[in-house]
Every structure is written in structure tokens, then in C-alpha cells.
Image: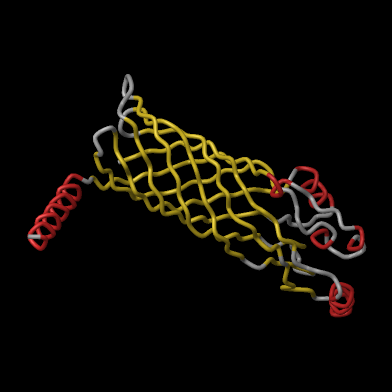
């Protein structure tokens, strides 16, 4: 008897899953983002003991980020759950931030290329879409988890007399968002991206003056060249869905 009940329940579960899969709709989305860095990502670190080191990267390794922009692409399935829809997704984003205007001007005055920040978070998550309220407006909430790759571009002189690069780093990240669909093909939302804690760590790529290179290596050897920084972004996100 128990065996029969288990078989019936198992068959029912399989049929329910197959029914949900058959009703699922694969959709693609493309996004444009305006991003505002938050927390430690906006801070400059003043380190007087490095002030004599050249170039500016060594006196202020953690340069505050400023307003940026980005984009993203998403693949998602939509499942009808009665009171709305649940949509598991895979999402890849790109964020770009420059350093703040004060430091950017300092680099420009010194005729140095300034670094920029790039973040590439890859999220797996789910969206819940409530039933349409009025005039094709459908509110949603979503959450995602995944790794973030952070790349900081190199800095220095155009002539390559000296050029400094940064190590690429990865960290676990999350995102949360609230917004609304306007019809089937356009959405808008406010998101927070917690992109994890990254270790900002420079590497010397090119330094033609060997004596200067040796002197800087000696000065820098006793200092902690890594700076751990919590990276976050507040984003306004516009999506187009197909």
C-alpha cells in the first residue's frame, strides 16, 4: 500500500514538473545601467608614509570611484505560479567607474593616464513578478548571487617611461532589486550590488629607469601593498526584454 502511494505521488510530481517546464518561457533581456559607487568604493585612502613614492598610485592606492555606467544581458525562464510568475535567471553585467574628479585632474595636470574600474558580476538568481496591477504595470522583486571580477586599468605615462598595472581580483557578490515591467518588453528598477571585498594590489609592468625601479622596490618592500576594499554600486537599470 505504502509503495503504491509513493509511486502515485512520484508520478504526480513528475507530471507537475513536466507541466511547469512545458509552460515555461525562455526570454532574453538587455540592460543599460547608471551606477553610483557606495561605501568604501567612494573613499580615498591617505597614506603619508607613501607620499614620496611615484606615481600617484602609491600615495593613494585606493582611489575613490565616481559615477559610472554599464550594461548587461540575461537569460530567464518564466513560470506561472498563480499569483504571478517566478523567473530564474542567469545574468552577466558590466560596470565602469572612473576615479573622482579631484584625482582625475591631478593625473591630467601631471600628464599621466588615470586608472578606471571595471566590474563583471555573473549572477544566478530569481525574479518574482506580481500579477499585473493596472495599465500593463507589473511590479517585481529579484535577488541574485555569484562571482564578481574586478579589473583596474593601468596608469602612468604615455611614453611608457613608467607604467603600473593592478592585479585582477574576484569576490563573491550579490544583487537585490525592485522595479516594474511596463508592458512585456520594457522594465525599470533600482538595484543594489554588493560586489564583495577586493584586494587592490599593484604590479610593476614597465619602468625604464632601473635605478628608480630598484629604489621604489626597496621603499615599498616593507609596506603592505594590498588594500582590501568593500565594493558596492547603487544602480538605476532599464531593461529591454524579448
Q: Position of residue 14 (x, y in %)?
A: 15, 56
- Using the image, determine if residue 55 lies above or below residue 12: below
Q: Position of residue 198 (x, y in %)?
A: 65, 60
What is the image's colouring? secondary structure
Would residue 82 be found to the left or right of residue 182 on screen?
Answer: left
Residue at image point 66% right, 43% down? 38
Residue at image point 36% right, 39% down? 128
Q: Position of residue 197 (x, y in %)?
A: 64, 58
Extreme residue toward the front, this view = 1
Q: Nearer the viewer, residue 113 or 118?
A: 118
Q: Nearer the viewer, residue 28 or 24?
A: 24
Q: Nearer the viewer, residue 68 or 87?
A: 87
Q: Position of residue 40 (x, y in %)?
A: 71, 49
Residue at image point 45% right, 50% down? 144
The image quadrant that residue 25 belongs to is: top left
Q: Quadrant of the N terminus?
A: bottom left
Q: Quadrant of the C terminus?
A: top left
- Using the image, determine if residue 136 lies above or below residue 168: above
Residue at image point 43% right, 42% down? 142
The image quadrant that residue 168 belongs to is: bottom right
Would residue 76 be found to the left or right of residue 120 on screen?
Answer: left
- Using the image, determine if residue 135 lies above or below residue 20: above
How many circles with numbers are drawn on the protein?
A: 0
Amino acid at each position: 500500500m505504502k509503495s503504491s502511494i509513493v509511486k502515485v505521488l512520484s508520478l504526480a510530481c513528475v507530471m507537475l514538473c513536466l507541466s511547469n517546464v512545458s509552460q515555461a518561457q525562455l526570454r532574453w533581456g538587455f540592460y543599460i545601467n547608471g551606477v553610483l559607487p557606495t561605501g568604501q568604493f567612494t573613499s580615498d585612502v591617505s597614506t603619508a608614509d607613501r607620499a614620496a613614492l611615484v606615481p600617484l598610485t602609491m600615495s593613494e592606492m585606493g582611489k575613490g570611484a565616481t559615477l559610472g555606467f554599464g550594461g548587461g544581458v540575461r537569460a530567464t525562464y518564466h513560470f506561472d505560479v498563480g499569483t504571478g510568475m517566478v523567473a530564474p535567471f542567469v545574468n552577466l553585467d558590466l560596470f565602469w567607474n572612473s576615479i573622482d574628479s579631484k584625482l582625475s585632474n591631478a593625473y591630467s595636470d601631471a600628464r599621466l593616464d588615470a586608472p578606471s574600474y571595471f566590474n563583471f558580476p555573473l549572477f544566478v538568481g530569481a525574479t518574482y513578478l506580481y500579477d499585473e496591477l493596472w495599465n500593463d504595470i507589473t511590479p517585481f522583486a529579484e535577488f541574485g548571487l555569484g562571482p564578481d571580477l574586478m579589473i583596474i586599468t593601468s596608469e602612468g605615462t604615455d611614453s611608457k617611461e613608467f607604467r603600473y598595472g593592478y592585479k585582477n581580483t574576484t569576490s563573491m557578490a550579490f544583487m537585490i532589486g525592485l522595479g516594474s515591467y511596463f508592458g512585456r518588453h520594457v522594465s525599470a528598477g533600482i538595484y543594489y550590488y554588493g560586489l564583495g571585498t577586493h584586494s587592490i594590489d599593484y604590479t610593476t609592468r614597465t619602468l625604464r629607469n632601473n635605478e628608480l625601479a630598484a629604489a621604489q622596490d626597496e621603499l615599498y618592500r616593507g609596506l603592505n601593498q594590498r588594500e582590501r576594499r568593500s565594493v558596492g554600486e547603487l544602480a538605476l537599470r532599464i531593461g529591454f526584454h524579448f
